Amino acid sequence: MLKKVVTLAMVVVLCTSISSFALGRVWNSSTFVSNNEPFFDTTLTTKDFICLQLEVINKTGENIEIIWPETLYIDASNATNGGFMSGQEIYWADKDRPINPTIIFPKTKAVKNLYPSVLAYWRGGWGHSWLPLGLNGISLTVKVGKQEISRQMIIKVVEK
């Protein structure tokens, strides 16, 4: 048992050292918060510098739907650059599979980790590159009743 614990501890230390060495730097990111919309509040940040973490809070008494085919990644050039993967893809053919609809019920919130498709790669399984330094964001499109609303949300990833 002790041998397993020591081996596990060595693996954790080695992996931490490798990832720190591979990065060779410390990153930081801003957080985008919008709470002035009449129908929903949003927060965008990065969870791990690989994906964007989106939080949408429904302030209405009706369902809100995130329209994934119209929700796009905004890259450092401030242009849209494809859509997102949910991180649940298994096979190569899953790359272009649309994300299942997200319905946010009244007075609740949804949190999604979104992986820009343009930063994904295949090596016998899916991997995701780091978010590039600079601007990263989402052009979010939601449907409230019969109304579609689009908003841009941008964060900045910087090297400390």
Image: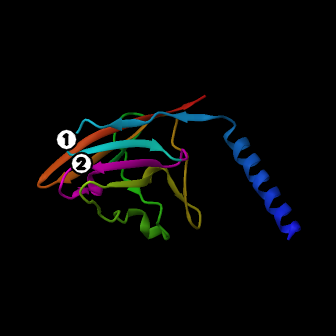
- Residue 101 position within the rendered picture, expressed as x and y whole percent measured from the top left: 29, 63
- Residue 9 position within the rendered picture, expressed as x and y whole percent measured from the top left: 80, 57
Q: Is residue 128 above or below residue 124?
A: above
- Residue 16 position within the rendered picture, expressed as x and y whole percent measured from the top left: 73, 49
| Residue at 38% over, 63% down | 96
Residue at the disc numbered 2: 59
Q: Please name whichever residue, 65 or 124, is drawn nearer the observer in this view of the structure.
A: 65
Q: Please name whichever residue, 114 or 103, is drawn nearer the observer in this view of the structure.
A: 103
Q: Is residue 94 above or below residue 71?
A: below
Confirm whether residue 122 shows in the render: yes
| Residue at 70% over, 47% down | 19
Let me know if residue 61 is in the magenta part: yes
Mark 2 crowd level (few <14, some 14–19, many ≥20, 10 Å Cα): many
* 59 to the left or right of 156: left
Residue 1 circle label: none
Q: Secondary structure at mark 2?
A: loop
* 128 to the left or right of 95: right
Under mark 1, the amino acid is Pro
Q: What colour scheme was applied to this rendering of the protein?
A: rainbow
The quadrant of the rendering that contains the N terminus is: bottom right
Under mark 2, the amino acid is Lys
Residue furthest out toward the left: 146
- Residue 34 position within the rendered picture, expressed as x and y whole percent measured from the top left: 31, 37
Q: Which residues are magenta?
A: 48-71
Residue furthest out toward the right: 3
The quadrant of the rendering that contains the C terminus is: top right
User: To which quarter of the image does residue 150 belong?
Assistant: top left
| Residue at 39% over, 54% down | 111
| Residue at 29% over, 43% down | 41
Verify CB contact (< 8 Å) between mark 1 and mark 2.
yes
Residue 38 circle label: 1
Q: Secondary structure at mark 1?
A: loop
